[in-house]
Image (spheres, helix red, strand yellow):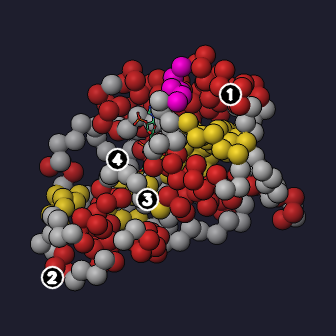
Amino acid sequence: MSAARRFKVVVRMKVLITGAAGLVGNHFSQRLACEHEVLALKHADLDVTDRETVNRCVLDVHPSLLINCAVIQVDESEQNPTKAQAVNVEGPRFLAEAANRVGAEIIHFSTQYAFDGEPVGRAPYTIQDRPRSVNVYGRTKVAGERAVVESCARSYIIRTSWVYGSGKNSFLCTVHNDLRAGKRVRTIVDIWSSTTYVEDLIDRVLKIHGTCRYGTYHVVNENVCSYYEFALEAGRLVGLSRDRLDPLIERVKESEMSRIAARPRYTPLRCLLSEQLGLPPMRDWRAALAEYVSVSK
Ligand SMILES: NC(=O)c1ccc[n+]([C@@H]2O[C@H](COP(=O)([O-])OP(=O)(O)OC[C@H]3O[C@@H](n4cnc5c(N)ncnc54)[C@H](OP(=O)(O)O)[C@@H]3O)[C@@H](O)[C@H]2O)c1
């Protein structure tokens, strides 16, 4: 197939984004707003679990693309499985059904927590690996993927992992500034995954969308690290020597964190569909982190 046939020319689209106040939703909304007509809906604007309102909204707006970024996070899912089912499974289903009704495409985000992360050191997970989650979040996200695919044939499922970027208060997003300010941070040494700079995630998702090849993609920066290694690199990038860094970075095991939900230990991802499409590997996580640190001073 020629390159001209494989990649569609993307004209100005009408895009509806849900969960638009979150990390991915907010960055996606800003990136698309210059070239497309974007309706970025926060939780207060549209509750994805309200089937009737979702339907009415999608029929009124009549987008050509829906991007669902709404989610209930890991520990909250464990504490409230009913809510996790509603937001991570039923909401995506309602959006995909509505997308199907108006002939739109849907991009839906999922997670490396689809997998159990065993054994440590294994090959990166591909779409040929059977999902097996260790917590409610992972199980509901996998069920959400299925609900979307069953409801709308024009769907892109984007599994990503440890996403960071500006505007969110999370370890990955803020550790470089905490270290720069001389704050002590706790880092987990025995959980590893792929990491993803949100701008790289958006670049790659837009490329994938341009191919018209529906399916399940794994979109992450190359190679794997632990939270501890991520913090070490972030500290190095803000100019701290090992002598300065070591006393600031406390090393703990996951078992010492007493978090509510279990976490998979080792979940690097690899994208077979991107390889088939001839898309190059995404840059190494250190290069992506270097860019993030340099722009978020
Ligand atoms: N961040 C990561 O490290 C990561 C890793 C792997 C996969 N992902 C996937 O990427 C996607 C986006 O994640 P994110 O990090 O951007 O999440 P986020 O920052 O936690 O944002 C999620 C947003 O969803 C909203 N939301 C919650 N319930 C809702 C509902 N019923 N209706 C509408 N909106 C609702 C939240 O609003 P309120 O706070 O007001 O409730 C929040 O603004 C998710 O599918 C997630 O599974 C993220």
Type of the residue with mark 4 = Pro
Q: Which residues are magenta?
A: 45-50
Q: Earlier in the sequence, mark 1 or mark 3?
A: 1
Query: At 23% from the left edge and 57% from the top edge, which residue is drawn?
Result: 188
Q: Which residue is mark 2?
A: 243
The percent coordinates of residue 178 (x first, y second) are: 24, 64
CA gap, disc 4 and disc 1: 36 Å
Q: Which residue is mark 4?
A: 264
27 relative position to 190: left or right: right
259 relative position to 119: left or right: left
Q: Earlier in the sequence, mark 4 or mark 3?
A: 3
Q: Nearer the viewer, residue 267 or 248?
A: 248
Q: Which residue is mark 3?
A: 165
Q: Main secondary structure of the magenta part?
A: loop
Can see residue 54? yes
Front of the two marks 4 and 2: 2
Where is 193 relative to 146, above or below? below
- SS at mark 4 in the image: loop
Number of other residues with Cα within 10 Å of mark 3, as a class: few under 14, some 14 to 19, many 20 or more: many
CA gap, disc 1 and disc 2: 55 Å
- SS at mark 2 in the image: helix
Can see residue 108? no
Q: Earlier in the sequence, mark 2 or mark 3?
A: 3
Query: At 73% from the left edge and 36% from the top edge, which residue is drawn?
Result: 63
The percent coordinates of residue 179 (x first, y second) are: 23, 69
CA gap, disc 4 and disc 2: 32 Å
The percent coordinates of residue 255 (x first, y second) are: 18, 48
Front of the two marks 4 and 3: 3
Where is 154 relative to 293, above or below? above
CB under 8 Å between discs 4 and 2:
no
